[in-house]
Image (cartoon, coloured by chain):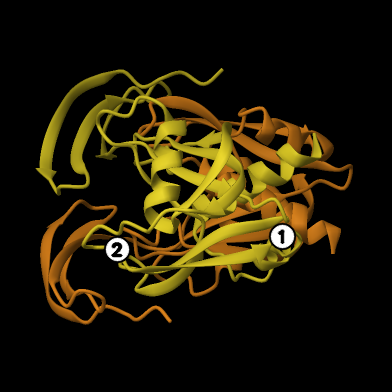
Chain colours: A orange, B yellow
């Protein structure tokens, strides 16, 4: 049985606006020795599997500043401080990034983006019967293009490495498993 | 067509041993205004889908210091500086963490863990016919238990939220897609 590591102390290492960095000094339950672990603290994220009534998925292309590449993704973003439900974030982000709105919204999965070094959760919300009915509302750091892709092509796009954002891949697996139930 | 953002300047914000933080000042191709983007620079990671000849998957349980939870995962780790191939890392990490060794090793997928804020890649390597033949070699920060789980149970464990590390979920989807080809 795996035991938790008791925490002796914790130290803040800086605020980088979208995340903070701390280190925790903890005791190994196996060796009884102390080690420091760096943790990135950040807010929760939501991504959206948005489908049209004719079996297409609403996707976005955007330049990503970590990889410095253009990525084919699904809509999504961070939960605002006042948002207590990932479903509310999903509906808002879908509208802001693509102008699409659907009917119903279902939480179909959640993951830790990186439980080794990050403390947050990423939720996947399914929204169906989506239609483009709003203007897009990009914030000043956004520049993206909405693309509709046939739902049946999605698994082969993942297998072929055309969709490469890990959290998008997890969302697509959750949808794959959800629609088979 | 999405355009890249020209970089005006870049600034280092600190070295946290397992990653460094920098910020880039870049110009939006849409609005022509400057913005700062924080990037976490780190090494590449590898995770391992390790199967036995009787259709079980070699999994590990360990306490994770970001989420502060015990997670059910697959073996994996960071590419050492001298390792130029993810396959070599996969074989080493499988042996060190579980004592298992298999025959052959195939790269079946790769993702950007977070292309928005991280610059690295995570590779998934499949190793088949695995058998426990070595002693485990934990480093001083490791404490894990190896578990074999029937391959056919894996998708339902993902759907039920029993496997929650996003990069593990992507690896399992890559395997799911790979074995259907």
Of residues A20 and B4, the one nearer the viewer is A20
Q: Earlier in the sequence, mark 1 or mark 2?
A: 2
Q: Residue at x 66, y 67 (%)?
A: B157
**Which mark is nearer the camera, 1 or 2?**
2
What is the crowding at mark 1: few (fewer than 14 residues within 10 Å), some, or many (at least 20)?
some
Q: Are marks 1 and 2 in contact (CB under 8 Å)?
A: no
- Provide residue A35's location: percent of width, then percent of height: 15, 66
Q: Which mark is residue A65?
A: none
Q: Which residue is mark 1?
A: B155
Of residues A179 and B4, the one nearer the viewer is A179
- Provide residue A52's location: percent of width, then percent of height: 81, 46
Q: Secondary structure at mark 1?
A: helix
User: Which of the image's four quarters has the N terminus of chain A?
Assistant: bottom left
- Provide residue A62's location: percent of width, then percent of height: 51, 31
The subunit letter for the residue under badge 2 reads B
Q: Residue at x 26, y 76 (%)?
A: A30
Q: Give the farthest residue toward the right.
A: A54
Q: Quadrant of residue A110?
A: bottom right
Q: Which residue is mark 2?
A: B142
Answer above or below: position of A6 versus A31.
below
**Is residue A102 visible in this depiction of the protein?**
no
């Amino acid at each position: 049985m795996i035991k938790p590591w008791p925490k002796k102390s914790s130290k803040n290492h800086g605020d980088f606006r979208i995340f903070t960095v701390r280190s925790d000094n903890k005791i190994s339950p196996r060796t009884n020795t102390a080690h420091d672990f760096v943790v990135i603290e950040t807010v929760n994220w939501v991504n959206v599997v948005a489908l049209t009534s004719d079996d297409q998925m609403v996707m976005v292309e955007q330049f990503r500043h970590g990889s410095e590449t253009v990525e084919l993704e699904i809509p999504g973003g961070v939960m605002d401080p006042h948002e207590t439900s990932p479903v509310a974030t999903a509906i808002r982000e879908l509208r802001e990034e693509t102008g699409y709105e659907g009917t119903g919204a279902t939480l179909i999965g959640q993951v830790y983006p990186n439980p080794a070094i990050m403390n947050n959760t990423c939720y996947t919300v399914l929204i169906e019967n989506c239609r483009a009915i709003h203007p897009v509302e990009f914030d000043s750091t956004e520049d993206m293009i909405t693309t509709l892709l046939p739902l049946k092509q999605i698994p082969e796009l993942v297998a072929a490495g055309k969709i490469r954002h890990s959290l998008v891949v997890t969302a697509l697996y959750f949808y794959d498993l959800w629609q088979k139930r």
